[in-house]
Amino acid sequence: MRRCGANRWWIDDATLHVRRERGVKRVLKGVAALALSAAGSFFLVKGGSWDPQALLLVALAFAYGLKSTLGVWEVSLDRVRGKVSWVWGLGVPMFRWSRRVADFDRVRLFTQEQSPVRDVRLVGPGRDQLLASGTDPDEVFALAEAVVRHVRLGLQVGTGRVRPPGELDSPERARALAQLSARLQGAGAGSLLDASRSEPIEVPAPPPGCRVRVHEGDGQWRLILPEPGWVNGFRVQFGMGVVTLVLTVGVCGYLLSLSMEALLYLTVMPFVLVLGLFGARFVWKAAMGAITTCHLSVSRPGLAVERSTSGLTRPIRIPAHLIRDIDVRDHSDGAPMTGVFEPSTCPMLIIDRSDGKLLALGAGLPREELEWAAALVRQRLAAEAEARRQESPPEKAARGA
């Protein structure tokens, strides 16, 4: 599965699926809205007031909270049946509506004014339907191209001309994509690192003050991404978590000081406690992000990654034939929080796998240091791939055993 903003997308046989995920921030805002709705209902009932405007605000907060915490949204494009379907529900799919793919004539990449958000839409005469949104240009464009190839419609970027699907399959573009995919794969079946033999990977000089370390000895090569420390984003996230916990304790104390019926306690308190759990999670994630060190070890079998916090490690091993790319780009997984209502991203070292998964490392470190580290890992992987190519069949068999 691949990501596009808050969505995951994948192709299953003849159907392309786009599913919106409920992230932590979205669920947190939903829980806050539900808590606000519960508190508003309590005070309205206690005061005996049935003001229409207050009731409308309570209803809107309740609806928004349900949508954010339980909302289900998925789009399916069936190439065989020639249909595109949208599914929506609360917790489980509840409503579905479908259109014929023939009702649309292009896939449009649309950038919202004064916003980094980009939309992928199906557009036709009198029709304009949203498929997914995201802030990462590469992720959004990758989804738009996948939709174009899947349903064979034209692609329009902004208000530009509509490019037919055949342009995406031109020899020049296919060659460029092959070179991009060929950079970091191992030799043998499914290998794509053959390009490294004719195009050696060059590593620039390390940036001034670089804290990334490389250790090589006893036949082992290891690169260490240091802990980022309390950079501004982690401070903001930690502070928001502490404020949320203090607010939770204060609200709990205030509610306990009131003489309420047990039913009202059971209605309001769960929302307050859930809010406190999210505050605790913010504190924990910020602390772990600030003190995490990443170790990358490159060997003949592939790449091993360990995250270390206070001496505890979690090894992740990635076979060489699954490594599609090593790059640096803005990503959201594990990024320190810099805003409340917008997704937080920061430069991270991305290990992209051919099975659609990816691993994001180095949140909070400077982009220059991450780019230097990525170049080192690419160079080492290319060297190991070349060594595998030069092995004799008996050596390969012995290593496989």
Image (spheres, grey):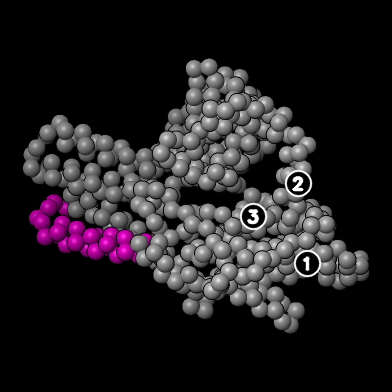
Q: In this view, does 279 lie to the left or right of 149?
A: left
Q: Mark 2 points at which residue?
A: 178
Q: Which of marks 1 and 2 is nearer the N terminus?
A: 2
So how many labels did they put on this image?
3
In the rendered image, residue 392, in percent from the top left (x then y), is placed at 91, 67
The residue drawn where x is 49% and y is 42% is 134
Report x, y in % for residue 326.
65, 58
Q: Which amino acid does label 2 sit on?
A: Ala
**Kind of residue at badge 3:** Asp
> Would residue 280 be seen by someone viewing this image from the given angle?
no
**Direction from residue 254 to residue 2 in the image, left or right:** right
C-alpha distance separating marks 3 and 1: 19 Å
Q: Nearer the viewer, residue 30 or 349?
A: 349
- How crowded pointer 1 is (Cα within 10 Å; few <14, some 14-19, many 20+) is rated as many
Residue position for label 3: 352
Reading the image, the residue beneath label 1 is 383
Residue interval drawn in magenta:
237-262
Q: Is residue 291 above or below residue 353?
A: below
Location of the C terminus (image quadrant): bottom right
Q: What element carries label 1?
A: helix
Q: How far apart are marks 2 and 3 (CA)?
A: 15 Å
| Residue pictured at 72% horizontal, 77% vertical | 220
276 displayed left or right of 358:
left
Type of amino acid under label 1: Ala
Check disc 2 and report its element: helix, strand or loop. helix
Q: Which residue is drawn at 68% across and 37% down?
A: 13
Q: In which quarter of the image is residue 49?
A: top left
